[in-house]
Image (tube, rainbow, N blue to C red):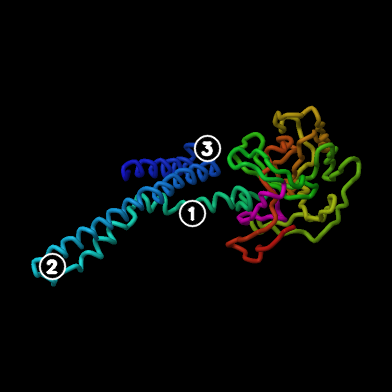
Amino acid sequence: MSTITAVVLAAFVGYGAAWYFGAVEGNFSLLLFLASVVTGIYWLAERFYFLPQRYKAAAALEESAARRQAELAQKGITQVDNNNLGEARARLIMQPWWLDWTAGLFPVIVVVFLLRSFLFEPFKIPSGSMIPTLLINDLILVNKFHYGVRLPVLNIKVINNQSPQRGDVMVFRYPPKPSLDYIKRVVGVPGDEVAYINKKLTINGKPLPKTPLPDFFDEDVLRYAKQFEEVNGTKKYRLLNDDTRRAGLDEREVMDFPFKQNCRYSSEGMVCKVPEGQYFMMGDNRDNSQDSRYWGFVPEANIVGKAFFVWMNFGNLKRIGSFE
């Protein structure tokens, strides 16, 4: 069993190394699921077979020592050195390394798997597309059950909950490459007509209130950007605009995506009708965000969860807290 276990552990390590160096496209949910299954099998085997066998061997050792002591007593020998018996028993009962690294890790792995799959999942913000709401290197928590309970790995919804609302910050699987997780703000829900013309967002013909705020200083690029407060539905949030970037889009900048016929592009911006079961996403850093304007709508099946809390930023502890 030790050889088989070494091969299994080496396979996990090899997969992780290949993922880290970009040789394969990793899937952490699948990896965690497989780790839970494998360590669970070892845990069951340990609990119902290997551990009873070790205790049985220890009992046999004690029985043998007791018989020997009785035989010696019949011969008049009463002083018997049994100091090594306890050590030998402890060695027999001790869990071998290959069970320690499998069955011993099962409770931790399965708790992490369940928490991450059904309650909260941590993410790291890799880019500046959601500045000023979320900064690069913010470590955030995502509520996995807010939009309904989904089966891990398969991401199939089994229990409905709330639907995404305009203004929510949502994590989702990037439609052109579902193995990647993206984070943007929901600006349009099914049935909405979303227009972004001359850097002004309009939903169903109604311009969203947009109030100027003091300029935002981006410490990463050491420059100021124009900052505004926008109201979408019941949500208020800040956004940035860059006067050096144009609002319009060229058709050549836009990917081919499902329901692209619902969108019109011009030198002033774009207009899209959101299909049923789809959502239109935009970054708060409006002129520095690759979002639904470029790659299309997010299907309901791609939803991961609702982002709501910054739990750490090692470069700026003041970032910790809710951004809702």
Query: Is residue 142 a member of the stretch shown in magenta?
Result: yes
| Rendered location of residue 236, percent (x, y) | 81, 55
Query: Is residue 28 a member of the stretch shown in magenta?
Result: no
Q: Few, some or many C-alpha atoms within 10 Å of disc 1 (few <14, some 14-19, many ≥20)? A: some
Foreground residue, 211 or 168? 168
Q: Which residue is mark 2?
A: 73
Q: CA distance from mark 3 to mark 1?
A: 27 Å
Label 1 residue SS:
helix
Q: Which residue is mark 3?
A: 25
Q: Which residue is mark 1?
A: 107
Foreground residue, 164 or 45? 45
Q: Residue 220 vs residue 66: left or right?
A: right
The quarter of the displayed image where residue 257 is located = top right
Q: Amino acid at mark 1?
A: Pro
Q: Amino acid at mark 2?
A: Ala
Toward the bottom, the furthest residue is: 79
The residue drawn where x is 19% and y is 67% is 82
The residue drawn where x is 70% and y is 61% is 322
| Rendered location of residue 133, percent (x, y) | 72, 55
Mark 3, mark 1: which one is toward the viewer? 1
Q: Which residues are magenta?
A: 129-147
The quarter of the displayed image where residue 300 is located = top right
